Image (cartoon, rainbow, N blue to C red):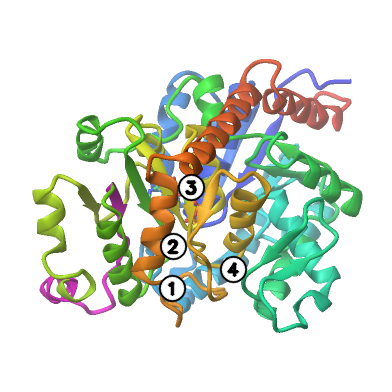
Amino acid sequence: METQGPLKIYFLPFFAQGHQIPMIQLARLVASRGQHITIVTTSANAQLFQKTIDDDIASGHHIRLHLLKFPSTQLGLPEGVENLVSATNNITAGKIHMAAHFIQPQVEAVLKDSPPDVFIPDIIFTWTKDLSKRLQVPRLVFNPISIFDVCMIQAIKAHPEAFLSDSVPYQIPGLPHPLSLPVKPSPGFAVLTESLLEGEEDSHGVIVNSFAELDAEYTQYYENLTGRKVWHVGPSSLMVEQIVKKPAIVSEIRNECLTWLDSKEQDSVLYICFGSLVLLSDKQLYELAKGLDASGHSFIWVVHRKKKEGQEEEEEEEEEEKWLPEGFEEKIEREKRGMLIKGWAPQPLILNHPAVGGFLTHCGWNAVVEAISAGVPMVTMPGFSDQYYNEKLITEVHRFGVEVGAAEWSISPYEGKKTVLSGERIEKAVKRLMDKGNEGDKIRKKAKEMQDKAWRAVQEGGSSHNNLTALIDHLKALFPVST
Ligand code: UDP
């Protein structure tokens, strides 16, 4: 049975770009099917996506914002620092994570004041499990990582003996594929993820930014293990473009880099970006620059190197000399071979440019899904946490990427790893993918095949398209009487 009217659905995204971007896309998709959406967030976070939803609203989609007060004073954070994208160290990041708990009374108030039919928080808000139960509001959780990652986490938890031996790589038993890890996960990561996964309990299922064909066996494994339903509604950016028929992200960034790409041959440029959080050490940046230069390939490199507290602009300029090989910028400009973007890049647009033939990535889940959507093969260099697992999906399960070779596990995106990956190692991995020849060609073919599957998944009759319909039907069936 269905309700007569639209469902009133509240989304609560976490304060990080890797969580917020796909969740806003999901909210837009659900709104495009006639449901009434409220995004519960804080003012500085809303500013990051306001432009993206404005056009949907103008087209008659019901999306409204409910603004919470970010607990800046309580946490001792400067005004406007409300998202992990502004954090450069563990202390600030820790405070933003704490804010996810501090907002609980405000969220409770809005749920009580005007109860939604369905509540969809990010998995990080573990307290929503008890709150929803208490207020009897049906809840689904949004999980920004992949189901493949969750399976890896579960398999590692079930097989601690896998890490007893000193010989690397560590073989991880019990999964649909024989997989190995080059590094040992830190115990802190296991504790963190376990508490997050507990947050999924009592929910009507988990929504992920993925598509069934990408990790079908792992989804089965997960559903058997937990008894919870997985809703693959992705790639969310592709779905927005196909279903909402609007850009997935509206940004004001001047696209100088796209003009630069226009002058390049098809599949000839490597795009390098480590997501919205990872800060590489100066030594690692130096080696990366050396490796890129030595590879001989053209590249666009997004460098997120944020100012340290109290650091002046001039000092920053001076420091740049230290982390780049001497004359590097002048050389790549003279040879028209490289471009540095020191700030936020229009990543999906870059990845979809025909000249881009490879993506050196930190393996954040959104980056992976965006690369697949664009049919771009990857060079993997995980930054932290679940990104080591995503690397396995790319290089061992589907083989549409090559690894640089992780040498150390890190749980924090901010602290430079002690082990620096050498320029030679990076050069070798880049050449394996970008040099014309057998290996690169095979990998590229696999990436294009997976892109094809992603595109089919989002078309009418495709798996993600059907999942979106099934998800809304499932939610409506929770309300036999019109509300
Ligand atoms: N992103 C972007 N420009 C940048 C850096 C990141 O548009 O300069 C976007 C990227 O396209 C992705 C998100 O930010 O949608 C980052 O999410 P991901 O899961 O890849 O990594 P995280 O930042 O969470 O480590």
Check contact, mark 2 vs mark 1: CB within 8 A: yes
CA distance separating discs 3 and 2: 19 Å
Q: Which residues, given as a range, are shown in magenta?
A: 298-320
Q: Which residue is mark 4?
A: 102
Task: Compare marks 2 and 1 and give the one earlier in the sequence.
Answer: 2
Mark 2, ligand 1, within 8 Å: the answer is: yes
Find residue 442 and report its horizontal and vertical position in percent. Answer: 53, 38
Rendered view: 279 above or below 121:
below
**Secondary element at tag 4:** helix
Query: Around disc 3, counting alpha carbons within 10 Å, would you say few (fewer than 14), some (14 to 19), or many (20 or more)?
Result: many
* Residue placed most toward the observer, 379 or 146: 379
Task: Compare marks 3 and 2 and give the one earlier in the sequence.
Answer: 2
Quadrant of image for the N terminus: top right
Amino acid found under the numbered disc labelled 3: Met
Q: Nearer the viewer, mark 4 or mark 2?
A: 2
Check contact, mark 3 vs mark 2: CB within 8 A: no
Q: How many marks?
A: 4
Q: Which mark is residue 378?
A: 3
Q: Nearer the viewer, mark 3 or mark 4?
A: 3
